[in-house]
Amino acid sequence: MTTSDYRIQGDTGEWEVVVGLEVHAQVTSNAKLFSGAATAFGAEPNTQVSLVDAAMPGMLPVPNRECIRQAVRTGMALDAKINRWSRFDRKNYFYADLPQGYQISQLYHPLVGEGAVEIALDEKDPDGATKTIGVERIHVEQDAGKLMHDQHPTRSYVDLNRSGVALMEIVSRPDLASPAEAGAYLRKLRSVLRYVGSCDGNMEEGSMRADVNVSVRRTGEPLGTRTETKNVNSVRFVMATVEFEARRQVELLEEGGQVVQETRLFDPDRGATRSMRSKEDAHDYRYFPDPDLLPLELDDAFLDECRASLPELPDTKRRRYEAAGVTPYNANVLTAEVETARWFDALLEAGAEPRAAANWVGSELFGALGRLGLGMEASPVSPRQAAELLGLVADGTLSGSLAKQVFEVMLETRQDAGAVVEERGLRQVTDTGAIEAAIAGIMATNAEKVADYRGGKDKLFGFFVGQTMKAMGGKANPGVVNELLKRALS
């Protein structure tokens, strides 16, 4: 079943699920959107707050060029319309972590217009059926601060370190139709942001989170009333939110109730959502143009600079790998994370054959890094060293099993493959005379098994291969062993 076949079966028939995501991505920038205060994660509370962030009287905001640049580059990567003229608005509401009493955002004239994200309906088959998810807009806004409830039994404290941090709000159209599609979209979007470098995508640190809009309807009926579950901070939780909320709404409607337009929160411990407050509409926030900020006007030179700085994006890179002989599945795995793709590109630049390199990275390297609890960027073996190791396999110096031994030593010592081979005497033996002598000895001590093999017990061939490799200390060329054994046993 593809993700598009997803339906919820109720007592009275099937229901379709309609999902839209509003992804809040923290812009990669050393300073905030309208001030020079730092944005580093993990700082002591209220140590990264300027007078602008704290809304001191008379302090005026000044847009950070780098934040605007990163948002424009993101729009270009999503093939979206870049609006040369955009404007900031004030979104008015009161909350303890919002010093100004309003948030500077963009409602009426966003920086980026319509774009698209293409997802694979089966992520294990990236060359199979795909679906295009519309992006309605990307607007730039400032983040609020953070309330801290665990510092005192009866008091809450306010940390303004995040106040004024630049966010891109990436609003999808309601084109997602299942938990799996929501997960695939979020993973693909995060991958693109990381390639572009406009957001690090660390949902655990809060630099990327999603508001999940869910409604249900009968096939062919108009859109139903939606709920919005705020600040969901992992792909798994987004998928769980869609699943729970859709089933909750179906059950409610089939019992004769009505879905209330409201804001909800996801409880990861229960795997469920709960009501937080009634859902506000735009007019509730009394939006109006920010009088302290001039409209943004982008010229050709700025747009050309943004476009020229874009890297090769995941889909283009995946197609390049496939054209070089990498299987579609491996190409998809290698391009999912930008760190992996950069490492693999360096491996190819060092001279590795693409197909063999992809197979080795997907099995040996990923396995070793998983065992060691390391990411690609912390690999003890460099792309250059890996290319040398694969080259020794390709030219017959090492067999597959010997290459595994060499690789384990490289992981431990960080030595080059050639040095390990020479130091430990792990070079593959192709001397037919030595192998024939070993075979002769094995046949002499296993005369009964030789007779059984010649009598039709073909499966004994594996026994003779194993004995020969053992006698040769695992260094014999397997192809030569097979050839000489067949000749001797026949």
Image (spheres, rainbow, N blue to C red):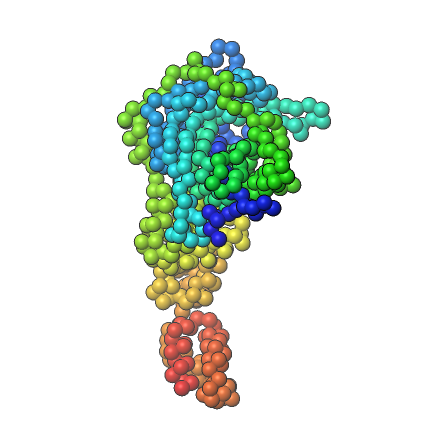
Q: Is residue 195 left or right of residue 22?
A: left
Residue in front for this viewpoint, 277 or 320: 277
| Percent of width and height locating residue 177 | 48, 42
As displayed, is residue 158 above or below residue 212?
above
| Percent of width and height locating residue 267 | 62, 37
Q: Is residue 346 left or right of residue 245?
A: left
As displayed, is residue 201 above or below residue 292?
below
Q: Residue at x 43, y 63 (%)?
A: 403
As displayed, is residue 420 above or below residue 87?
below
Asked if residue 331 shows in the view, the reply is: no
Residue in front for this viewpoint, 244 or 449: 244
Q: On the image, which quarter does residue 490 sit in?
A: bottom left
| Percent of width and height locating residue 24 | 49, 32
Residue in front for this viewpoint, 54 or 134: 134
Q: Residue at x 51, y 10 (%)?
A: 57
As displayed, is residue 363 above or below residue 132?
below
